[in-house]
Amino acid sequence: MPRAGLSTQAVVDVALEIVDEHGLGALTLAAVAQRAGVAPPSLYKHVRSLDALLQKVSAAATEELAGALSHAAAGRSGLDAIRAVALAYRRWALERPGRYPATQRVPDPSDPDHVAAAERAVYTVFAVLHAYDIAGDDAVDATRFVRSALHGFVSLEGSGGFGLPQDVDRSFDRLVSSLDVALRAWR
Amino acid sequence: MPRAGLSTQAVVDVALEIVDEHGLGALTLAAVAQRAGVAPPSLYKHVRSLDALLQKVSAAATEELAGALSHAAAGRSGLDAIRAVALAYRRWALERPGRYPATQRVPDPSDPDHVAAAERAVYTVFAVLHAYDIAGDDAVDATRFVRSALHGFVSLEGSGGFGLPQDVDRSFDRLVSSLDVALRAWR
DNA sequence: GCGCGTTGGCTAATAGCAGTAGCTTCTTGG
DNA sequence: CCAAGAAGCTACTGCTATTAGCCAACGCGC
């Protein structure tokens, strides 16, 4: 029989397809194997376990998100920057509803790329705060605040947590304005 | 053989014990059955499925959280109220790390108690906003903002998302102050 | 073009899970 | 006190991850 020609990267790519199409919860080794045209145990030649695959999916998702954020922040500052980053964050999460939750997994310390991607995402927010004259421990607090608001909003929206019919876009716009107001008053 | 004397409520109670001790992810019918001293299929006499049990756990958790929030808000207003509610929210989530994620499940429309509990929680925040002179659609936006910030913070904290060593209590304090600043400027 | 080691597949099997079918026995209302 | 419903049970299906051990394909040196 001819070989399938898999590799760790190929397995991760198939996993990402499944996650994109059917959500993170649908990611099983059985599903990956079927889509890759291979028997389930064969995957263990490329991936240590389902959990390890999830971790790699998380790394890929985090890298993509970090890229979207830093791209959005590039060349902007102040309200302009925070708005661009917030919009990019929400947009990416809505466009990739399967990948977004994977992003929340804490990075594997032994995967330098994963750690770097997570740091890059946080650092992007950190950099935006410079324009507000926030630095040091204050910047840590403010970054946590911004991350909390963004993650909370996107996560509630994604899981259908906003029951009322009012316009969600408008609510997010107000959230961004509020972040600006709060950051201006941070010192 | 003597009967175990189970009931739907008893099954839910056992489920809550497991969730408190080992986290929401450890909630399986097999585990519930073992702790209840019963064979797994017996549970189906009291609960329709694992998913239905999760929903009931979610309802119980939401009711408890709503109670904590409205208790905290009682008799307070303005910064005082928002701080009390925020502290109660975080405190409850930290004390019940297993139950908190269950809270995020969207209520079963056919379970009036569950729906009522969720509405009560949202309404508590809603009421706090009255002291800030926020009403109507503005109140919806502001409530979503507050929920997002609180949920985001607690959820990131709970999953170990705050990697840096800086004091998390202090960050939360600053978050609460920022909510106050933002709400004051809401109109 | 030939051997050979490495590697990437495979089948078979174990163990844990949810859920169904159908039987039995306890409990209780009339 | 007895009939029927409720609450257990065993046996089974089918899905999942994961391990063990086998075998064939591929690539490299000759």
Image (tube, coloured by chain):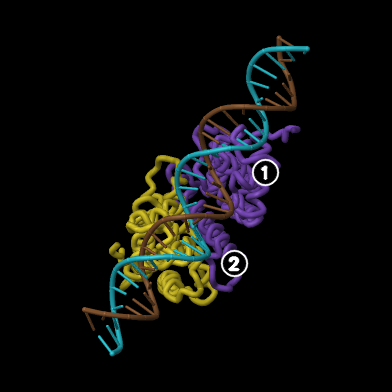
Chain colours: A yellow, B purple, C brown, D cyan
Distance between the alpha carbons at the discs numbered 2 and 1 = 33 Å
Residue nearer the viewer, A164 or B32: B32
As drawn, is B28 to the left or to the right of A51? right
Tell me the number on the disc at residue B14. Answer: 1
Q: Amino acid at mark 2?
A: Val
Residue at figure coordinates x 55%, y 35% from the top left: B48
Q: Name the residue nearer the viewer: A50 or A67.
A: A50
- Tell which circle, 2 or 1, labels the residue nearer the N-terminal end: 1
Q: Residue at 61%, 56% (x, y): give it.
A: B90
Q: Quadrant of residue B171?
A: bottom right
- What is the chain identity of the residue bearing mark 1? B
Q: Provide the chain ID for the residue under circle 2.
A: B
Q: Position of residue B34 (x, y in %)?
A: 67, 45
Image disc number at residue B168:
2
Mark 1 residue crowding within 10 angstroms, few (<14) / some (14–19) / many (20+): some
Q: Position of residue B79 (x, y in %)?
A: 59, 55
Foreground pick, B154 / B14 = B14
Is residue B113 rendered to the left or right of residue A72? right
